[in-house]
Amino acid sequence: MRRCLACCVLVVSACADWQRPPLTAPYRATEPLLQEQALVGLAPDGSAAAVQLIDAEGAPPRLELLALDARGGETRHLAAAPESLARAAARRLRAGGRRAVPLLAGIAAEEWPDANSIAASSGFAPRAAAAPEPGNRRWPITGVPGAGALPLVVRTALTGGEPRAFALLLGERPGGEVGGDEVELARQPIAGIPIEGELWLWHGTAWLLSGSVADGEPLRRAVGLRRGSLARGEAQIHNAHGYSDYSAGELDAAGREFERAIAADPRFVDALYNAASTAALAGRPAEAIAYLRRAVEVDPRRVQVLGRDDDDLKLLRRRPEVRALLGMKRAPPETSEEGKDR
């Protein structure tokens, strides 16, 4: 059984879409450092097109159009603005950079309007940011129908401790009220005055725009996009419920929750593996092997690490096809604590 905590914040997605590329000489540490992104369009699969401006330590500013993958895959470069437009955008961002609000979207729309048409021709349509509930930073949503269509809520929160960060969270709304299990979808580290931006929810993906501007001189400003998978977050919630049922010996209830987790995210290997373990314990080997095969298709190495010594799969490991899935050349000696065959 793949263990997890049932009532805690779980890190689901750490996005690599917002990274500072290496700088090339000449650069000067006494010069401002500005890095900002702005979402300009969304694709049907939830991927995003974003303009990005980097004006760092005296190096020539760069204004680019990027395609950010909804599944966390490699970022693609779509276009670059002429240097004259990049410099004009950088001057405007420097002039207003102390303001604790996102600025690049408006600047880019005026200085480089071609970015929007390039994004549209690449399959990214402009979409308005999601509107939160009045008076707070919460966005009610409904879960996947196959997973029970749970009432869920997305919210943002400023974390304590160091380093501080904006966290994007997905939680349950039992009875329509916030208060159930909650998982973390994404996190944006901040340094200085927080810049709380906007949120887009589109086809199972959440894009959070946020950042910060540091105190003092020179100007240090970073505003970027973070990606979170709503499907994976919902699957995490069901998986946590399933593990609670499993720990209580309620295998039928656990199996139902793992099935809901898989319905929310068919490639969530933890839920696939846990469904296999539960089916094995319940005496349904064919079902267990089917789930195990699906888990291996997603992440064979992880399944092998989990499954080679898991007591839940002890009987299944007698089968050659299961040992093949787990990368085992021979049947291990399955012994009890007293050293006797089980």
Image (spheres, grey):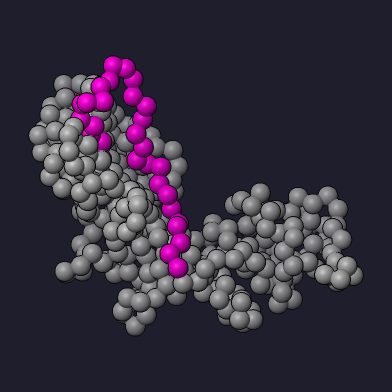
Q: Residue 76, how many percent across, how many down?
A: 38, 34
**What is the magenta range?**
8-37
> Quadrant location of residue 96?
top left
Q: Residue at x 54, y 57 (%)?
A: 267
144 above or below 217? Answer: below
User: Which quadrant would the C terminus be assigned to in this image?
Assistant: bottom right
Is residue 314 toward the left or the right of residue 96 in the image? right
Q: Residue 223, how many percent across, how many down?
A: 25, 43
Out of 285 and 234, give the one closest to the viewer: 234
75 above or below 140? Answer: above
Is residue 116 toward the left or the right of residue 241 in the image? left
Q: Residue at x 17, y 38 (%)?
A: 216
265 above or below 192? Answer: below
Magenta segment's dominant SS is loop
Q: Residue at x 43, y 64 (%)?
A: 9
Q: Residue at x 12, y 45 (%)?
A: 99
Out of 265 and 104, give the one closest to the viewer: 104
Q: Residue 83, how many percent across, how many down?
A: 20, 21
Is residue 241 toward the left or the right of residue 323 in the image? left
> Quadrant location of residue 131?
bottom left
